[in-house]
Amino acid sequence: MINQNSKTLLEVRGLHANVNGIEILKGVDLTVKSGEIHAIMGLNGSGKSTFAKILAGHPAYEVTAGTIIFNDQNLFDLEPEERARAGVFLAFQYPIEIPGVANNQFLRLAYNTVQSQRGKEELDPLEFDDFVREKMKLLEMSPDFLDRSVNEGFSGGEKKRNEILQMALLEPKLAILDETDSGLDIDALRIVANGVNQLTNKDNATILVTHYQRLLDYIVPDYVHVMESGRIIKTSGKELAKELEAHGYDWINTDDRGNTAGVRP
Amino acid sequence: MSAVLQNLVNQPYKHGFVTEIESDIAPKGLNEEIIRLISSKKNEPEWMLTFRLQAYEKWLSMSEPRWQNVKYPKIDFQSISYYSAPKPKKKLASMDEVDPELLRTFEKLGVPMHERAALAGVAVDVIFDSVSVATTYKEKLAEVGIIFCSISEAVQTHPELVKKYLGTVVPVGDNFYAALNSAVFTDGSFCFIPKGVKCPMDLSTYFRINTEESGQFERTLIIAEESASVSYLEGCTAPKFDTNQLHAAVVELIALDNAEIKYSTVQNWYAGDEKGIGGIYNFVTKRGLAKGANSRISWTQVETGSAITWKYPSCILRGENSVGEFYSVAVTNNYQQADTGTKMIHMGRNTRSTIISKSISAGNSNSSYRGLVRIAPTAENARNYSQCDSMLIGNQCSANTFPYIQVNNNSAKVEHEASTSKIGEDQLFYFLQRGIDTEEAVSMIINGFCKEVFQQLPMEFAVEATKLLSFKLEGSVG
């Protein structure tokens, strides 16, 4: 929801970044306020997933220029784990498998680490078990997930639900969902989207990185940005996603390319 | 991130100190005179001397094996001192009389012997260099007929048992280092569990090499009679030295009908410094004979130390329905090398074996799994399952798997699975993104990887092993 009086949570200015010496981001600007949902759309290779990972501090990417202010802090001053504790959450496009590490053990460690950093109470295994089971209902997950190894042998949909479960536990200020809709059937998409909707409120913000408009039927964005060649080339309201769906990304190239004036990026 | 990891991996060896206790050291070198000296110092009967001399004769005719996947400079066996014993001051009636310097050593190790014994209910047969100095709980064990003492003592007090079983599983001429051990072993543990007795506590020996340049040659013999069972723990730590030390032990296990022997090791000998200077050469022959029907021999090892680890704790499954197990975690870092695995020799009908091997390599280290599964023509319906998983940390280390499978009976079922994985940036980043720091992440990933083996360890050892691994690998990812 847009409220001009909301606090600015994220301010990205002139962000340039390389991976393996190749420039991927070529000047990204983005402002996100509390309570807002932003969708970043674009073709494969446009730089949207790179942008998501840079926000979380992935070590493979080198930032060469620009600034990111998150919640009044210089984001580049924070290590990846400090960003997570400060409230930056990335739901991974491809959640990695961790053999032998029980999901409940992993979830509890993450939860307690973040809780203690925020000066809040940690939970013992029994308390945590009750707590996490409650959260799992939100995502219609079976309690079996707790005893399985983290993401090991999970289907694509199960992995994505496990990501949103972590979002529910860690209660981030800024959640970045990287292609969370990819590989989901329609039922799983509905469950995941419903989970995300229940987690959004006026004090947090969400960035949805997606290729398709489909997800946006379920999670309605306040802003839609189109990324191409490492820059945001167009920003508009939710109707932009529909137009992209109808006309394709080429439609921007012919019509509106470069014309982002007047719309707050 | 990689700087943090570097620091973690490069923590100095905690147990590096030398205890100053007067040692009675034999002149360097090996010849018949030295062997006679060892035997007479230990007041051994004639048959024991004969055993040693036969072994020495075999050894002279053997040459050092070179097939292993580890590299080290040629060992000069004439520059080793083969006997070193703390000078006996007087007979000790209780722990209070133990040399305070010795007690301080145990405290530095973080395992004060008496506390460890009292708190954990473990009888500790302490090997300090080569001679046993104190044995606890002996009386309690004696009540149920269990003999747990140093092998030197057993030679004196139970010569018939030692004579009957010594060298029956690992013959004097079995291999180069076993022959050497048989000729010059100075001490070790002896354990005998009589028919029908379940040993009421885990038996434990704390080994420690102390005198610089004195190779240590321990000899362990464990016998479980019909329907007896025992769990034996071996833990190792050694002080820091710059010259390599040879450690060539022999362990023999014998299980009669329906008997069970579980042998667990946590090995943390000095591994050398981060440049690969110094460290222990750990060349060990460990073998169990599942002699009786329905007997079971189980090896669990967590190998984290030594410059070179070269050992294959093995099972000869002779009894019908006998079971052999091998659970192993081998961790190498810096310039450590390991060539370890097992041999499962199936001879009896319906024999079963399980091999779970996990190797973790970091730094510039090299780790090899080498395992033999042999199904003899007599082994109807034999079963084996082997799983060998390797994990690499960084890109300067290596891991190899050398499985040997020989099947001579077509009713056998032999399965082998192997995998290699890497703690990658992405795995680590996943933890970091959830607020978990690098150290905890590495520890969790490693412990998850080793879980199947750690589950086999007795509780107190499992805790120790978990900490040891985190400590060994801190800072090695990047």
Image: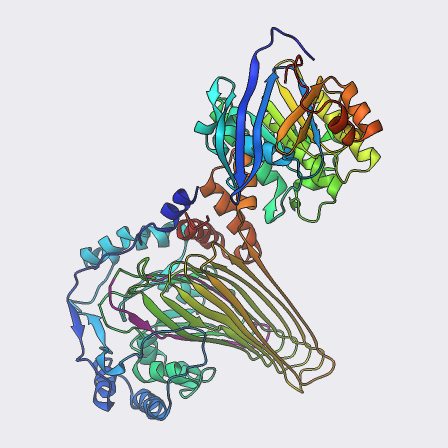
Q: Does residue B261 show up magenta in the picture?
A: yes
Name the residue furthest front.
Answer: A254
Residue in front for this viewpoint, B442 or B287: B442
What is the magenta range? B241-270
Q: Quadrant of the C terminus of chain A?
A: top right
Q: Decide: is A253 above or below B134.
A: above
Task: Specify the quadrant of the image occupied by residue A124.
Answer: top right
The answer to whether B307 is drawn above or below residue A157 in the figure is: below
A7 or A60: nearer the viewer: A60
Q: Which quarter of the image is occupied by the N terminus of chain A?
A: top right
The residue sitting at 17% across, 63% down in the picture is: B21
- Residue A198 at x, y percent in the picture: 72, 21
Q: Majority secondary structure of the magenta segment?
A: strand
| Quarter holding residue B295 | bottom right
Residue B245 visible in the shown view: yes
Q: Quadrant of residue B28?
A: bottom left
